[in-house]
Amino acid sequence: MNFKQIAVAALLCLPALFLGAQSKAPENWFLLDPAKDGVNGTGAETALQNLKAKGKKGQTVIVAVLDSGVDYMHEDLKDVMWTNPGEIPNNGKDDDGNGYIDDIHGWNFLGGKDGKNVHHETLELTREYARLSKLYAGSNGQNLSGEAKKEYEYWLKIKEEFETSRNTYVNQKEKIDGRMQEIANAFAMVQKHLGKTDFTKEDLDGIKTGDNAELKAAVELSGKMLAQDLTPANLEEQRKEATEFFTSQLDYNYNPDYNPRTIVGDDPNDLSNRFYGNNDYRGPDASHGTHVAGIIAATRNNGVGINGVADNVRIMSVRCVPDGDERDKDVANAIRYAVDNGASIINMSFGKGYSPDKPYVNEAVKYAADHDVLLVHAAGNDGENNDSDPNFPNDAIDKKGKGKKTAPNWLEIGALSWKSGDRRVAGFSNYGKKNVDLFSPGVAIYSTVPDNKYASFQGTSMASPAAAGVAAILRSYYPELSAKQVKSIMEQAVVAQDGEVYKPGTTEKIKFSELCVSGGIVSAPQAVALAEKTKAKPNKKASWREAGMGKPKKGKTVMP
């Protein structure tokens, strides 16, 4: 899934041992309007109210969520799920002839014919390490030349990065295990002294430690943990989360011997095969994808849960993102599936540092552009500059991937905090004066998670669907505008940001305008106002698209 996304998300989920407590954000802040509410939200509520006041009617648009899966039965999503009109449910037939059997709400490119699913995966770095180890492990490269020499040098880079990263997680695991045990021991000593399992700050303040240095240290540490919402009651849960995280990293993500692809049953290197997988739209862990779907389109004003950014949306679930790095083959085929089945917008809240089959993904991106589909992508959570540090997939579609030719239908989104002033930008967000288009709400975002539940997540994974929701408003109420025009409108209609902010991942301050192409944050009201004035320039190649429905196409992918 990641550009270290899982790592960042998991570490953020750990107790504030590492982070310090954060003041509470308004629960629906990503919908609010900076002008009216003083919070840097999308302004979706204001935009929709304005459209309603004008008597403007929207048409239904399909937004494909390429992700870990979506709980399509969630109380706040079941009424907004896309249903394939050409397919008869559960009859075991490909009724619409699109190459996918019983694809009622989407498709799962990580599933096998027996119904099983890939859950954990390796990182692309790990896969490259495993591939190249077979060729160059033990070699000194002295007898190599030409392309082989270049590949050997690439192998040395991969080897160093892989071994350094894996060792980092081994060391972190040891440190956190030790820290967790230290906290457990402190809690146990305080509990024994007080004669009860639960205690408060007042209880700690009342303890007379005298000359007992060990008890004094235990009281001080316990107090710090209580202040950061870590208590005896939730300690084991937090310890379990930490253990699961590092198990995932070391046993799966950074394990070159792990290969779950046999579950799918395809050859991952055979890029000509598009027709594999199953129709399990949810998968083994749909938390991430369900959260993303809710931000875009959770049923509005239904009296339960939350409101999504957009109305008139149907969510198509296309599962292609495991707990690890997605494969280029699956990403490309997921894009093509979404395009062929009528998506107007595709949200992609994932990314990685290597893309060995990028030309194949590029062809899918071009295919989406030719069919007037807007691609919205999360910039990444490494606090890095996307202008210099690669994040894939991206809009560079020239053969060498240098960005000389870029996709006209691509929006790259950074993450915005609800805070004001120099803390406006999320400290984890990637950025880029050339390669990140705008910023959108991505911190403390409250949305849907599986089994009719709700939770707050943060990441550019949340910022991307917030922006995709604004794009959905435009594509619904101004369907005559092309994907290229919607991209341009959203870049032009930002709320421009003055002053300096902390550069993500550093203590250095920088002008906001240096962090992205537009120099601003997403604005639904301003985007709607500009759309109202914009003359349509339809994408002629997409003339087959009618009323938001695509024309299913069955056949082999054209190889790059």
Image: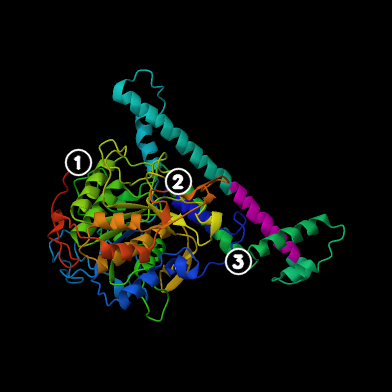
Q: Which residue is mark 1?
A: 560
| Marked residue nearer the N-terminal end (2 or 1) | 2
In space, the residues marked 1 and 3 are separated at their CA atoms by 52 Å
| Marked residue nearer the N-terminal end (2 or 3) | 3
For badge 1, the amino acid type reads Pro
Q: Residues within 10 Å of mark 1 (few under 14, many from 20)?
A: few
Q: Determine which of the numbered discs, if any, sits on residue 234 in the image.
A: 3
For badge 2, the amino acid type reads Glu
Dot 1: element: loop
Dot 2: element: helix
Give the number of the mark in front: 2 or 3: 2
Q: Say whether residue 190 is left or right of residue 460.
A: right
Residue at (40%, 50%) from the top-left corner?
A: 379
Q: Which residues are magenta?
A: 174-190
Q: Which residue is mark 2?
A: 514
Q: Say whether residue 144 is left or right of residue 500.
A: left
Position of residue 558 measured from the top left corner of the image (x, y, whole percent): 16, 45
In space, the residues marked 2 and 1 are separated at their CA atoms by 35 Å
Q: Nearer the viewer, residue 480 or 289?
A: 480
On-image quarter of the C terminus: top left
Dot 3: element: loop
* Magenta span includes 177: yes
Image marks 2 and 3: residues in contact by CB distance under 8 Å: no
Name which quarter of the figure residue 301 lies in: bottom left
Residue found at the very far front of the displayed protein: 533
| Residue 458 visible somewhere in the drawing | yes
Q: Residues within 10 Å of mark 2 (few under 14, many from 20)?
A: some
Q: Nearer the viewer, residue 414 or 452?
A: 414
Q: Residues within 10 Å of mark 3 (few under 14, many from 20)?
A: few
For badge 3, the amino acid type reads Asn
| Residue 242 visible somewhere in the drawing | no
